Structures are given as C-alpha cells and as structure tokens.
Amino acid sequence: MESAGGRLQRSLKEEAPLQVVGTINAYTAIMAESVGYRAIYLSGAGVANASFGLPDLGMTSLNDVLEDVRRITAASELPLLVDVDTGWGGAFNIGRTVKELIKAGAAGMHIEDQVSQKRCGHRPNKEIVSRSEMADRIKASVDAKTDPDFMVMARTDALAVVGLDEVIARAQLCEAAGADAIFAEAMTDLSMYESVTQAVDIPVLANITEFGSTPLFTTEELASAGIDMALYPLSAFRAMNQAALNVYRGLREAGTQSHLVDQMQTRADLYDFLGYHEYEQKLDALFSEQTEKNCNKRG
C-alpha cells in the first residue's frame, strides 16, 4: 500500500510545479481534492489563527497541530504537507514530531531555521539559529523517519536576516544533512529562486502567500526558475474570513441575510461535497432492513 509520503512523491512527478494549496480543516481539504489538486498543506499560522485565535508566534504545540492533521487526513486522500515551525524542541522532540506526523497520516513536513520564539516568515525582526543547529534539526528529522518517502523539507528564513548567499549556503548544508526538499522563504525576485534551484539537486518550494514579501508569481514563471512546488498556504482561508465578515456585517446591519444568500455555498453543494445522500441512503436501507426483520418476527 502506497504511503502518504509516497503519494506526495508521485504528485511531484505528475505536476510541475506541483501546486500545494492550504487547507485549514477537513472540509476545505475535501473541496480542494474535488477540484483536482494533487497535494494540500496545513499551515502553522492557519492552526494558530483558525483553531485557536492566536497569532503565528510559535504558541501552538505539537498536539495542537496533530489534531488538525488527523482530521484532514481522515477526510482526504491527498498527501498533506505540514508546517512544524521549529520542531518543538531539540533532537528528541523533533524526532517525536516526525514519528507522530507519520502516524497521523501526514506526507511530509517543513522545519525552519528560526529561533524557537519564531515569527511569521514575512514579518520583520526575525532571528535564525546557526548553520550547525539547523543542520542538526534536519539530521534529527531524517533519522526519525519511519516512512522513507516522508518528505523532510528544510525552510530557511535567512534572506531577510543575512542575504541570498546565506540562503544558498544553508540550502546546500541542509541537502547534505539529508533534507528531501528546500523551502526558501520570502524571496522577492524570480532570479533568487533560480539561484537556489541551481545550487541544489533536490526539489525547491516557493511560498506564494498574499500580502507578503514575495510577488504573486504564476506557475509558468516559477517553472522558468526551476521551482518544483508552489505553495498557497492561506489563500482560501483569507477569502473565507472576508466572506464571513461580510455576512456578519450584512446580517447585523440589515437584520436579514436575504441579500447575502447568493454569496453562500448552497446546502445542495455542501451535501454533494460531503456525500451526504450516500449516508442517508445507507440509513434508509438499514431502517428498512430492521423494519422488515421486525415484521417477520411478528408474522
């Protein structure tokens, strides 16, 4: 049976660059799968913001993330890439993170070189650990893999702190330490991505997040720079938030939602995504079977 990690590796071969779309819960994963995506993503910021109402400042735990991972992997067969921030501790903690993610059905993870009290990758005043400490994080991750196809992706935030040369140096160091892929965060130009992709022999991911430092490059542009994966971590989440806010405001102001219904997903569409009618038909069949048994007993 193909593992989740194996499905991610296969998706990488099937689509170039592979679009990896953020799903903050099980239902959004179902929708992403239905429209043809080959891989999905759980953002650390998404867990903090959506599940706990907290900013992305390293305040959530491994167990917090695992709960969302389990819900998503139970609902969708798409391979799930997970943001684990800095891994929640030293080598033993990082190793446990890898093992627990694999048990929960994740296909891969990315771990970064920020200090443990991390910040959003597109915010100022980030601090990063030494090269050797980041290499140790990757080694601990790789050593803990119980699925050889589970992807350990090394994310570096060095561009904003030191510069592009340091990004390249760290990418090469992480590759040597066993990383399966590189996540070069907050690049500001296509040529930067090209410099990274030419410096390593493993896949490179571009984070195409809105309202950040990176322009919204197209997949064609990213392909020209040698990018293997294009990540959209919170695009749907941001759209959902604005849509919800519009409904809350409109309902409060008008005293009715009648003028907002055309902006909502219909009940029929919801049921289609969930396979509701299949469940209902199964219930009907079970009730019918039980009724027939009761009638036969009385007869």
Image: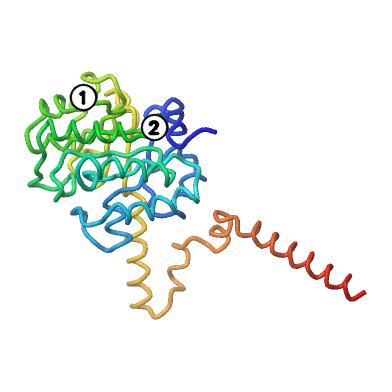
Residue 167 coordinates in the image, percent (x, y): 15, 29
Q: Quadrant of residue 40?
A: top left
**Residue 233 in the figure: left or right of residue 171:** right
Q: Assign a secondary structure to mark 1.
A: helix
| Residue at the disc numbered 2 | 18
Residue sitting at x 47%, y 63%: 262
Q: Nearer the viewer, residue 108 or 260?
A: 108
Quarter the C terminus occupies: bottom right
Label number found at residue 66: none
Q: Assign a secondary structure to mark 2.
A: strand
Label number found at residue 196: 1
Tag 2: residue type? Leu
Instruction: For label 2, count other residues whose C-alpha is less than 10 Å away and answer few (under 14), some (14-19) or many (20+).
Output: many
Can see residue 238? Answer: no
Q: Nearer the viewer, residue 160 or 84?
A: 84
Instruction: Return the residue found at the far front.
Output: 92
Tag 1: residue type? Val
Q: Quadrant of residue 156?
A: top left
Q: Is residue 47 above or below residue 2?
A: below
Residues at circles 1 and 2 in contact by the CB criterion of under 8 Å: no
Q: Nearer the viewer, residue 152 or 13?
A: 152
| Colouring mode (rainbow / by chain / secondary structure / one colour) | rainbow
Instruction: Return the residue found at the far bottom.
Output: 255
Residue 285 coordinates in the image, percent (x, y): 75, 62
Residue 23 coordinates in the image, percent (x, y): 39, 49
Gap in Å between the C-alphas at discs 1 and 2? 17 Å
Residue sitting at x 34%, y 66%: 246
**Residue 85 in the figure: left or right of residue 37:** left
Can see residue 29? Answer: yes
Residue sitting at x 18%, y 54%: 57
Quarter the N terminus occupies: top right
